[in-house]
Amino acid sequence: MPGKLLVFEGVEGCGKSTQLKRLHAALPQSDRLHQLQRRGFVPQILTTREPGGTELGAGLRQLLLSDRGGAPMVSRAELLLYAADRAQHVEEVIKPALARGCWVLCDRYTDSTVAYQGYGRGIDLDLIDQLNQVATGGLVPDLTLWLSLDVATGLARTRQRGVADRMEQADLAFHQRVQRGFETLAMQHPERIVAIDAAAAIETVAAEIFAVVEDYLQQWYAPSLTA
């Protein structure tokens, strides 16, 4: 059976990395997974992230998120570095994993580029779409879990973690534009983007995500589950 790509998206501090880990831990308890296993399908569950999901990407992540001082990184350079990370990530990690039947849980993907570099930085959206197509070879997530959270609340959470990375240091107006980008994407792609209220308690958010994923697994594998 083919694998599935599940992506976690959202503004800074929305909890996507935490929730990705919780879903990874919870999926082995899925009733749908147990049904598939009884039919001989035992998918590996792989977690990864952008930027930084490959050896090359780890170096690019350092460049993109570290506050290096000196001249600021220009927006076009930032966009191209993210595209380079994604191109390597898709070919080296994601596509081979999907071909093996893995379920890939990815922390950020193409929607982040549209939201951050498109709406946040103001780069032409058509150009970003073209670059995303080149970087991914047209690979679209099967499900995107958008953890929706008030920007100010999210930034307050990041400050509690300590030192902020280069993206987190951007001003409030930038992050508000990013949020509008995610909101627009959710309206444009309701077939794959599901909004999750990330303001709730961690356990509540995790339970909602698990329920959504269970429903999608039923849709994806219905013939196998009912056979």
Image: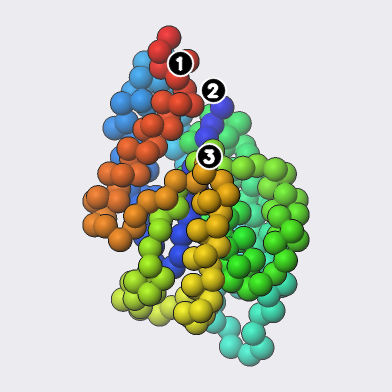
The structure residue drawn at horizontal position 36% and vertical position 33%, both measured from the top left corner, is 214
Q: Give the image quarter of residue 71.
A: bottom right
User: Which residue in the protein does label 1 denote?
Assistant: 224
Specify the amino acid type for callout 2: Met
Q: Which mark is residue 1?
A: 2
Category of crowding for the residue at label 1, using alpha-carbon neighbours closer than 10 angstroms: few (below 14), some (14–19), many (at least 20) = few
Q: Which mark is residue 191?
A: 3
**SS type, badge 1:** helix
**SS type, badge 3:** loop
Q: Nearer the viewer, residue 124 or 72?
A: 124
Q: Position of residue 25 (x, y in %)?
A: 32, 43
Specify the amino acid type for callout 1: Ser
Q: Which mark is residue 177?
A: none
The structure residue drawn at horizontal position 56% and vertical position 42%, both measured from the top left corner, is 141
Task: Decide if residue 162 is on the left or right side of residue 40.
Answer: left
Q: Position of residue 193 (x, y in %)?
A: 50, 46
